[in-house]
Image (cartoon, helix red, strand yellow):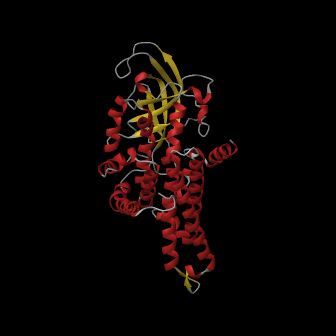
Amino acid sequence: MPVFSLDPAQKSWCDELRAVAADRLRPLAEKGEPGRINRPLVAALGELGLLDRMLTAGALDLCLLRESLAHGCTEAETALALQGLGSYPVVQAGTGEQRARWLPEVAAGRAVAAFALSEPGAGSDAAALALDAVADDRPGGPGAPGPGWLLTGEKRWISNAPEADFYTVFARTTPGAGARGVTAFLVPADRPGLTGSPIEMLSPHPIGALAFDSVRVTAADVLGEVDQGFRVAMNTLNLFRPSVGAFAVGMAGAALEAALAHTADRTAFGGPLKDLQSVAHQVAEMATRTEAARLLVYAAAEAYDSGAPDVPRRSAMAKLFATETAQYVVDAAVQLHGARALQRGHLLEHLYREVRAPRIYEGATEVQRTIIAKELYG
């Protein structure tokens, strides 16, 4: 399939998703409490089959899902994406028992997942993780039998924390080994010694900190291989980075539509705003950048699905350009609307708060530029 064109079935599916987001999911989102997991919304995503589709989707399908949901309900998009980010390490590296225990619950919207990578001193530099996994040869208790590790330390800026049902946790099993000494673990939220607290943020979705006080894990909790967890994290991010770009494109598209409608209807200086060249040219620039971002996202998704060797570069380019574009488009739409766009409850006020975070999480803009440069010179 050409990366620059969607077939009729894909276009129809995207239209259906936009309608579902606006008509069914938006009312549920509006009943949610900022900073808390909206479990009725997550359950609805499960009932609609969208979480199951997300778990089995290729990169392009995931991007279409996220872009379409974001256009009509950013909270629904984020709830779906966080389920995917937290559970994809289980999809790609989990044992049969881990997959059977958790993936059906995630797909049904009954269990909430979280991706626990960032720490107070290790955000963009994921290889600098310091959460300690100290070998423990004592017999384990219920839920963690046999020899294992004791996790001690803190995770921070974790979406869905502290209310998730399980966490994919990345901890240092070999000190001083950098990226090669990290192991991924599946840690249920009720594991003794694991506590958490919420962090109040600009964006409305739940984010928190996790404290590990000798939390016991064993070989049965390992995702993939010991000391190979960094690969699990990077494989997850390579899939989700283009779809963060898709989320951004969805927000940019919604802001662009709002700007088009407003400038066509709003009268000033003797005529509609759209007749002012400065306004018309601004909207044209917004539309052009949004379409360019969309094409970069689709190209990165196509590269991932086809197994192309340049996935890291394309994924980084897609996330970089799409998130920066969305920031520009939403800001420009606010400017064209004037003060009304800053009123609490206005679509653009909501998007203005939502659009800032994607330029930071899953690798900040500066990190994406570093990845691109390394790939080019490599």
What x and y, as percent, mark residue 354? 51, 55
What x and y, as percent, mark residue 239? 50, 45
Asked if residue 354 can be seen in this view, the reply is no
Quadrant where the C terminus sits is: top right
Q: Nearer the viewer, residue 356 or 374?
A: 374
Q: Is residue 364 left or right of residue 59?
A: right
Question: Residue at 55% of width from left, 37% of height from top?
Answer: 118
Asked if residue 213 can be seen in this view, the reply is yes
What x and y, as percent, mark residue 316? 59, 48
- Residue 190's place in the image compared with 48, above or below, is above
Question: Residue at 60% of width from left, 22% of height from top?
Answer: 175
Work out which residue is located at the far bottom of the displayed protein and give it. 270
- Residue 89's place in the image compared with 294, above or below, is above
Q: Is residue 327 left or right of residue 215?
A: right
Number of marks in picture? 0
Work out which residue is located at the far top of the displayed protein and give it. 138
What x and y, as percent, mark residue 349? 50, 62
Which quadrant holds residue 25?
A: bottom left
Work out which residue is located at the far right of the displayed protein and give it. 377
